[in-house]
Amino acid sequence: MPSFHMEVYGCQMNVRDSQHLEGILLSSGYEKAERPDEADAILVVTCAVRERAEVRALGRATQLAGGTRGRKPLVVICGCVAQEHGENLLKRFPQIDLVVGPDTYHRLPEMLSSGSRAALVEQGTDDYEALPSVRDTFPRAFVTITRGCDNFCSYCIVPFVRGRERSRTPEAILEEVGELVEAGYREITLLGQNVNSYRSGEVSFAGLLDRVARAAAPAWVRFVTSHPRDFGGELAEVMAEHPNVCRAVHLPAQSGSDAVLKGMNRGYTRGSYLEKVLMLRGRMPGIVLSTDMIAGFPGESEADFQDSLSLLAEVRFDYGFLFRYSERKGTRAAEMPGAVPVPERLSRLHRLQELQNAVTREKSSLLVGRCLPVLVTGPGTHEGQLIGRTAGNRVVVVHEGGVSAGDFMDVRITRADGWTHYGEKV
């Protein structure tokens, strides 16, 4: 029986897609190899959002291509890098055998059996409804509600590699959620490049979230990612109405400068972004907010950058995903004048990180002594440890027996180390 090994890079969407890939191969007679040197085929699921992630994934693929124990595996590049570069990957890397884009995963078994080098990256409208899937993240599960993106932020490659936005039907989503809850899953994360723009007939994202929250209870419900432009009061009201919808929102600001936001084609201003933050905190006091921020976007002046620093200081996010600007060929920003030198991008990134890390440590330390509900997700790295997540998605480590993955428990936080917290069962 042929075997496969898979390594996944990038976002939660890639994690969910990898579960489909695993299901497709298992249902086609393959077995899963835990180690790459035991596999007949190695799949590398790639991310193209940043250059570093792309280089890392391709480097790993070429490393794995050498094989061991006298076997030479087939190497398959999947995901966004496959879609971005297509057949050029076969020309650049003779070690790579197959290139498969996100909309053609269902054809992977026939490509593997053909024995020929090929690239299949046609874009379509596949919603993955008919594809088999394997869940391996118990008790947390991802449920994709949209695929693709119509935003065309000037720095982002996603619309080009993931295609135009399309929404699944609420009926299909609710059926999947119901099956997960029945199987014991206790956290459901709704996935989309921009969940706020979900629309199926007359059902908006707020309407969908309302239905999912009712169907999933008592399981927790999360969603990523939210575009600030589309985050409205109706959605905040639905969140506040349902106690099992986690009081945590990832709201990527990307910049604190109106000039840079305009160049990014984000569709909102600093002022309108801050209004959303005030609305969320007003309706759900204590809500956990995280963000993305890019340092060194083309044309970003020192004054523009100071606006980003001041936004971090004013909002005081619980956590931030901070990056230097990375050119992505084919995007509008890659052709913009005013490129910021890479050393300056890195310097600005470091300044953002210093500020955000200090805020994260301070906000986390305020939780010491508090009692929080925690969902146990599995064993820790050391014997006797358990790992869990709060509703705010904070990592919690406890030493406690008598509970297992999928159980909720109340934990008193005794120590905080950045985003990781330590506690004892109450």
Image: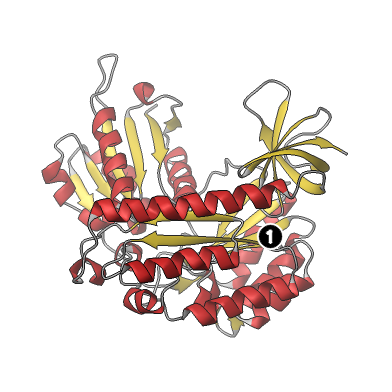
Is 32 drawn above or below residue 90 in the view shown? above
For badge 1, the amino acid type reads Val
Mark 1 = which residue?
221
**Quadrant (top left/top right/bottom left/bottom right) for the N terminus:** top left
Is 183 drawn above or below residue 29 in the view shown? below
- Residue sticking out furthest to the right: 426
Residue shown at 34% from the left, 56% from the top: 49
- Residue sticking out furthest to the bottom: 202
Residue shown at 68% from the left, 55% from the top: 392
x, y percent for residue 131? 47, 54
x, y percent for residue 409? 82, 43
Q: Quadrant of residue 48?
A: bottom left
x, y percent for residue 255? 42, 68
x, y percent for residue 413? 78, 41
Q: Quadrant of residue 143?
A: bottom right
- Foreground: 418 or 423? 418
Q: Quadrant of residue 124?
A: bottom left
- Residue sticking out furthest to the left: 91
